[in-house]
Image: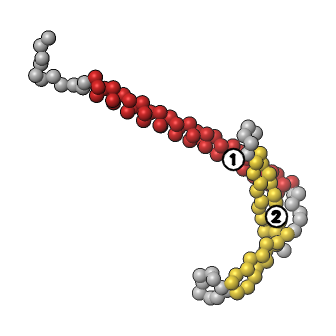
């Protein structure tokens, strides 16, 4: 067998080492893909539950079943960055509406609460 002085290329050992490195990187990336995919699916279930709760609240508003009057009180202690010191309480009357939503496939359940101010 003749030896060529201008041989260029990789040896078998170099090719095997490169293949092993490639396999290790591919396995690590596939593991990340699987866990990220589960996270994305879970976020989709939670979004579906939130949409169901919003629909329930919208339905209560549309049918007018939100006649109970409630109020929210805001107290200011002067720490608001303003040109004048504010030391008082503001009471806003309105309706508090609750909505519960479940995802159809996953086990996500969400409870939402909203406040709609009323003109008195």
Image quadrant where residue 69 sits: bottom right
Percent coordinates x, y for residue 50 in the rendering: 72, 50
Image quadrant where residue 42 sits: top right
Residue bearing the label numbered 2: 96
Dot 1 or dot 2, earlier in sequence: 1
Give yes or no for contact between labels 1 and 2 (Cβ–Cβ under 8 Å): no
In the image, what residue occupies the spot 59% across and 82% down? 81
State left or right for residue 29 relative to residue 120.
left
- Regarding residue 119, the answer to whether it shows in the image is no
Percent coordinates x, y for residue 106 in the rendering: 72, 40
Image quadrant where residue 103 sits: top right
Percent coordinates x, y for residue 77 in the rendering: 69, 84
Q: How packed is label 1: few (under 14 Cα within 10 Å), some, or many (20 or more)?
A: many
Q: Where, quadrant-wise, is the C terminus in this rendering?
A: bottom right
Residue furthest top in the image: 1
- Between residues 85 and 105, which one lies in front from this camera angle? 105
In the image, what residue occupies the spot 75% across and 82% down? 89
In the image, what residue occupies the spot 76% across and 56% down? 112
In the image, what residue occupies the spot 78% across and 64% down? 115
Up/down of 70 relative to 36, above or below: below
Q: CA distance from mark 1 to mark 2?
A: 23 Å
Residue bearing the label numbered 1: 46
Assign a secondary structure to mark 2.
Answer: strand
Q: Nearer the viewer, mark 1 or mark 2?
A: 1
Q: How packed is label 2: few (under 14 Cα within 10 Å), some, or many (20 or more)?
A: some
Assign a secondary structure to mark 1.
Answer: helix
């Amino acid at each position: 067998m003749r030896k060529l002085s201008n041989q260029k290329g990789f040896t078998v050992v170099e090719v095997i080492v490169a293949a092993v490195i490639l396999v290790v990187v591919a396995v690590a990336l596939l593991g990340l893909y699987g866990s990220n995919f589960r996270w994305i699916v879970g976020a989709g279930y939670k979004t579906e539950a939130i949409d169901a709760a919003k629909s329930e609240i919208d339905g209560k508003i549309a049918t007018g079943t939100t006649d109970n009057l409630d109020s929210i009180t805001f107290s200011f202690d002067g720490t608001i960055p303003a040109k004048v010191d504010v030391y008082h309480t503001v009471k806003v009357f309105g309706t508090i509406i609750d909505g519960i939503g479940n995802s159809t496939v996953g086990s996500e359940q969400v409870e939402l609460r909203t406040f709609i101010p009323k003109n008195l």
